[in-house]
Amino acid sequence: MKQFIKALIKRIPIAFTQNQKYDRDTKKVIELVCKENSNCIDIGCHKGEILDLFIKHSPSGRHMAFEPIPMLFEVLEENYRDQNVSLYKYALSEKKE
């Protein structure tokens, strides 16, 4: 039920939260910038929503996705097994630790 409500809210053309606004802006940028063969990197891939957009708008490109949370990474491995995506179980940061 929760997923259904979230999907329904995403279809409404009004952003109720800052996060929804950010997601819509990101989608617009991807639609404008990505070409058929663009290569894309999704840092903090989570459930793969942005990765799905990369694949949709750049189906001939090579895509990389980084997700350090083991449970989420396992789901990504399952969902993108046959896609042109390289998955990495790493967190990325500007600091060396």
Image: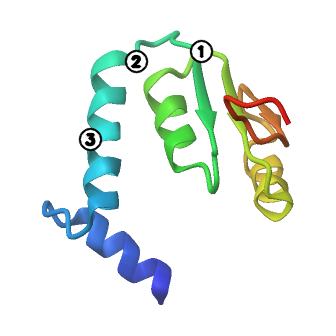
What SS does tag 3 mark?
helix
The answer to whether the residues at label 1 and label 2 have Cβ atoms under 8 Å apart is: yes
Q: Which residue is mark 2?
A: 34
- For label 3, the crowd category at 10 Å Cα-Cα, with few meaning under 14, some 14 to 19 and many 20 or more, is few
Q: Is residue 42 left or right of residue 20?
A: right
Q: Which residue is mark 3?
A: 25
Measure the C-alpha gap from mark 2 to mark 3: 14 Å
- Residue in the image at 60% along x and 49% along y: 48
- Residue in the image at 20% along x and 70% along y: 16
- For label 2, the crowd category at 10 Å Cα-Cα, with few meaning under 14, some 14 to 19 and many 20 or more, is some
Query: Which residue is farthest left?
Result: 14
Q: Position of residue 30 (x, y in %)?
A: 36, 28
Q: Is residue 42 left or right of residue 33?
A: right
Residue type of the residue flagged with mark 3:
Asp
Q: Is residue 21 left or right of residue 93?
A: left
What SS does tag 2 mark?
loop
- Residue in the image at 27% along x and 21% along y: 32
Residue type of the residue flagged with mark 1:
Gly
Quadrant in which the C terminus is drawn: top right
Name the disc covering residue 28, or none.
none
Q: Nearer the viewer, residue 37 or 43?
A: 43
Which label lies toward us, 2 or 3? 3
Q: Position of residue 93 (x, y in %)?
A: 70, 34
